[in-house]
Amino acid sequence: MLRAVGGIDLVPLPDGDQCCGFGGTFAVKNADTSVAMLSDKMRAVLNTGAEVIAAADNSCLMQIGGGLARQRAGVCAMHVAQILASDGSESAR
C-alpha cells in the first residue's frame, strides 16, 4: 500500500522482522534485553538514513519512536495509516 503513496521513497529496514524489544511486560521484566533490542533496531533505522520510520503496531511505534526522540535522532515514527491518509501530500513532520 505504501508503494502507491506519491512523494515517498521506501527503504527496507534491515532485519525489519526482528522485535524492537517492547512486548508489553517483557520490557519491564527484561529491561536490559529490551534496551539492547531497541538499540539494535534504532541503529538499523538510523543506518537507512530515513526521515520517517513506519509501522502498523502502536507498541512498536512507541518503543522505537520514544527511543529515537530521546536520542534526538531527527527520525519521526508514524503509523502506516497516517502515511496513507496523507497520501504523500504533507510532510511527515
Image (cartoon, helix red, strand yellow):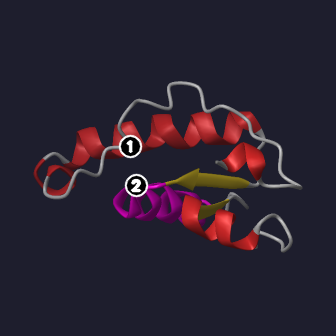
Q: Which residues are magenta?
A: 56-71
Q: Tag 1's secondary structure?
A: loop
Q: Residue at x 74, y 43 (%)?
A: 3
At label 2, counting other C-alpha atoms closer than 10 Å, the crowd grade (few under 14, some 14-19, many 20 or more) is many
Give residue 64's position: percent from left, percent from top: 48, 55
* Residue receiving disc 2: 60
Judged left or right of residue 49, residue 30 is left
Our reading of the magenta stretch's main secondary structure is helix
Q: Earlier in the sequence, mark 1 or mark 2?
A: 1
View extreme (top): residue: 15
- Residue 81, given in percent of the width and then of the height, sits at 56, 65
Residue at 23%, 50% (x, y): give it. Answer: 23
**Horizontal side, residue 66 vs residue 71: left or right:** left
Classify 61 as above or below 13.
Answer: below
Which three-letter amino acid code belongs to the residue tagged 2?
Cys
Does 80 lie within the magenta span?
no
Can residue 85 be seen in this snapshot?
yes
In the image: residue 69, left or right of residue 60? right
Q: Nearer the viewer, residue 73 or 6?
A: 6
Q: Quadrant of the C terminus?
A: bottom right
Image location (x, y in percent) of residue 15: 50, 25
Q: Which residue is mark 1?
A: 20
> Image height check: is 87 above or below 2?
below
Tags 1 and 2 in contact by the CB under 8 Å rule? yes
Helix, strand or loop at label 2? It is helix
Mark 1 residue crowding within 10 angstroms, few (<14) / some (14–19) / many (20+):
many
Residue positioned 19% across, 58% down in the render: 24
Of 38 and 86, the residue lying toward us? 86
Instruction: Residue 87 in the image: state x and y as whole percent.
Output: 77, 66
Is residue 59 found inside the magenta-colored segment of the image?
Answer: yes
